[in-house]
Image (tube, rainbow, N blue to C red):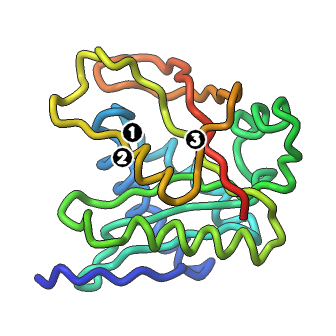
Amino acid sequence: MSDAVTVRDLAAGEIAENLTRIAELRIAVFRAFPYLYDGDPAYEAEYLQPYIRSPGALVAGAFAGGQLVGAATAAPMEDHAEAFAEPLAAAGLDPRDVYYCGESVLLPAYRGKGVGHRFFDQREARGRALGRRWCCFCAVIRPADHPARPADYRPLDAFWRARGYAPLEGAEARFAWTDLGDTVETEKPMTVWLRAL
């Protein structure tokens, strides 16, 4: 199979058609450290609904050989989870000025080919087109000595900083999910990363 990857925005109907595949990708990719997410297809179907309903939302798909191998999501902050808007408001930012980058998921075989940059390019362009002043995302905080941390783990901080993002000082979101090996959801602290558009 060719390893060439094309990235394009999905039309609203395509998002609905690919919802199961996007959920599968999220579950597969987020099982790895640092998210350690024990994914649930029913939860995923509900979580992804704002990207179908919101007229300002964007889902970019990465395709290789006609197969969806990655996806990136974004939406106006007011159309996303309240938990991510609260720390922005507390820091004095109007969430209605913010375009929220939900997540980027890409199968390991297709990483290192510039897809991550294309995902950000497309989401930032949509935020600008909507007149947003800021673009942000949240990243889970795990302790450096976490027992599931792989020896070769490299955080993405340098990549995000090269894109112009920086942690918003004093802002921390909290979001709950079930970790691998657990039976109940627990809240996780998350760093808010922000850049001006």
Q: Quadrant of the N terminus?
A: bottom left
Residue 71, above or below 162: below
Could you give the CA–CA distance between mark 2 and mark 3, rounded to whole angstroms? 18 Å
Could you give the CA–CA distance between mark 1 and mark 3, rounded to whole angstroms? 18 Å
Tag 2–tag 3 contact (CB < 8 Å): no
x then y, percent, for residue 62: 38, 74
> What is the number of the mark on residue 126?
none
Q: Quadrant of the C terminus?
A: bottom right
Q: Secondary structure at mark 2?
A: helix
x then y, percent, for residue 47: 58, 47
* Badge nearest the viewer, 1 or 3: 3
* Badge nearest the viewer, 2 or 3: 3
Q: Dot 1 corresponds to which residue?
A: 39
The residue depicted at 54 percent of the width and 73 percent of the height is 121
x then y, percent, for residue 144: 33, 19
* In the image, farthest residue toward the left: 1
Could you give the CA–CA distance between mark 2 and mark 1, rounded to whole angstroms? 5 Å
The three-letter code of the residue at mark 1 reads Gly
Q: Of callouts 2 and 3, which one flags the residue occurring earlier in the amino acid sequence?
A: 2
Q: Dot 3 corresponds to which residue?
A: 138
The residue depicted at 70 percent of the width and 38 percent of the height is 84
> What is the number of the mark on residue 27?
2
Instruction: Say whether residue 194 is left or right of residue 27.
Output: right
Tag 2–tag 1 contact (CB < 8 Å): yes
Instruction: Say whether residue 139 is left or right of residue 110.
Output: right
Instruction: Say whether residue 194 is left or right of residue 42.
Output: right
The residue depicted at 85 percent of the width and 36 percent of the height is 89
User: In front: 156, or 129?
Assistant: 156
Q: Secondary structure at mark 1?
A: loop
